[in-house]
Structures are given as C-alpha cells and as structure tokens.
Image (spheres, helix red, strand yellow):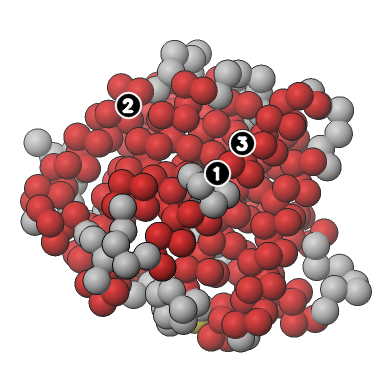
Amino acid sequence: MDVSQQIEKALHFAVNEITVAPSPASLVSALNYAMFPGGARVRPKLVMAVAQACGEASSALVRESAVAIEMLHCASLIQDDLACFDDASCRRGKPCLHTVFDDRLAILASDGLIVAAFERISSVQHVDAQAQLKLIGMLAHKVGAVHGITAGQAWECEEKIDIAAYHRAKTGALFAASTQAGALAVGVDEAPWELTGHLLGCAYQIADDIQDVLGDSTELGKPINVDATHGRPNLVHELGAENAIAHLRDQIDEVIASVPHCDNANFFIETIRHEAQRFLPKEIALSAA
C-alpha cells in the first residue's frame, strides 16, 4: 500500500469514527463531503515524508498526526470558502460545502473536524506521553490566533494586511506543523524542521499565486483570479509571471538547503521536488534554467 492509499484509509477510518449515531444525518453528510474526495493531501504526505526521512513512518502516532493535519486543513478550507471570506463556488472540482448544505452546517462541520483532529492524536495509546503532549501543543499553536491559521484567516478582516504575517500564518503554519509533526511523532527534535516547513509554506504560496493567475479552473477544481477579485496581494501581479516562477525556483532551493541532517534526506528532497512541480501549470517546468 503506497502513502496515498495509507492516508486515505486512515482518513476514512477517522471520519467513520466521528459520523456514527446519534450524530445528526446532515452533519454526517457534511463531514464526509468536506473530506472526500480529497485534494492532493500535501500536508499529510509531508508528515509521512519527514517521519520516513527521520526514521519510521508506520507508527500510529505518525498516522494520526497526518490525519489530524488534513482534518485541520479541510476545516480551514470550509471557512475560507464561506461567503463572508472568498465566497467561492467550487473546491476540489465540486461545489463548496456551504453551497450544497448551508452556512450553519459548514461552520459546524469545520468545528467538528478541528475537535476531531486533536482527538485523533490524544487517543493514540502506548506512545511517549511527552511526545504526544508536545504534538498537541504544537498543533494548537499552529491553529491559534497569534501565529496560526486562525490568525491567517483573520488578516483578511483587516483594512491593511501585513503580507508577511498573513502568508506565514495562513499558509506557512500548517506546513510547519506538518514537518514538525513528522519529526515529533518519531521522537526527533522538531525545532530544525520548523524552518523547512515555513519555507515550504512560502513556496506553496508562490505556487498558489501562479496558479491563481496562470492556472485553469477546470484542472484546479477551484476558481482562478480570486486574489484580483478580492484585492489581495499576488506575486505574479507584483513581479510578473516570469519573475514569480524564478522566485519559486529560488524558494525551492532554500527549502532543500534547510532540510535538517537525517538518514533519508534525499527521499524527502525528491518528495519536495515532485510536489512542487505538480502544483504548477503543466507548461511550466520548475527545473528549467
């Protein structure tokens, strides 16, 4: 079973556990709709890749960390799509959750996934309790109102956006959480992996800016030109497409240079290169000079 299959199996099991009777039928449907079919599952793959690079990716704590982070990510997408934020019509190639159900169930499904994420990690048995607590604390920080995804979403409510803080919180926080969780789950110091995660978040944000301007909405499964519609910053608008792509190449080089020493570092680096290329329009070669 490859990594993608492992992640999907674990996600289905986790969602099944929070959608049993007497959970209201509409909430059950909304939770399943939010999680499946999934997107690229980049963040849980990062958890697994770091764990594999540092040691062993098959433990229950690694698996549940990957599940938890994907739940948090999906919860954030639900909120991001709401009419009060992006007012998006589609996500992952299908109508957004709040348009199929309603705002009430969208908010409740998001709440349910956030709570379930922490429950997944806290319920793992026969593991180092200190590592488990550190994982929970780290995730709470990365979801929080100072440096976490809550802060990232809240920056969109401000008249003047601190761009660096906005991107670091909204995009970088869960990427850093992913790399740190992969290390913590196998008993490795997570501190050096935080920088790698944040740099990955920066790279992903650049790629997302490029997609938003140059991508195809049908292929992406979501609207494009969202930044222009909402008057938000976009690197392509600021630098031009060619310079934005060059900036992304430089950013990937920074990510690779930041990877901490570990037994399987090359495996992790190849994973990063592969994922980075997948998130660009097909005609753009990231490896081009």
Coordinates of residue 78 in the picture (x, y in percent): 55, 69
Counting residues from the start of the chain, the first of labels 3 and 2 encountered is 3
Above or below residue 181? Residue 161 is below
- Residue at mark 2: 256
Q: Are marks 3 and 1 in contact (CB under 8 Å)?
A: yes
- Inspect the image, locate mark 3, and give the three-letter code of the amino acid beneath it: Met
The residue located at (27%, 29%) in the rendering is 254
| Quarter of image, res 130 | top right
Above or below residue 90? Residue 78 is above
Under circle 3, the secondary element is helix
Under circle 2, the secondary element is helix
Q: Quadrant of the N terminus?
A: top right
Q: Quadrant of the C terminus?
A: top left
- Residue at mark 3: 138
Mark 2, Cα crowd under 10 Å, few <14 / some 14-19 / many 20+, is some
Say left or right for 171 vs 249: right
The residue located at (67%, 37%) in the rendering is 137
The disc placed on residue 142 is 1
The residue located at (48%, 37%) in the rendering is 176
Mark 3 and mark 1: Cα distance apart in space: 6 Å
Nearest-to-viewer mark from 3 and 2: 3
Above or below residue 23? Residue 42 is above
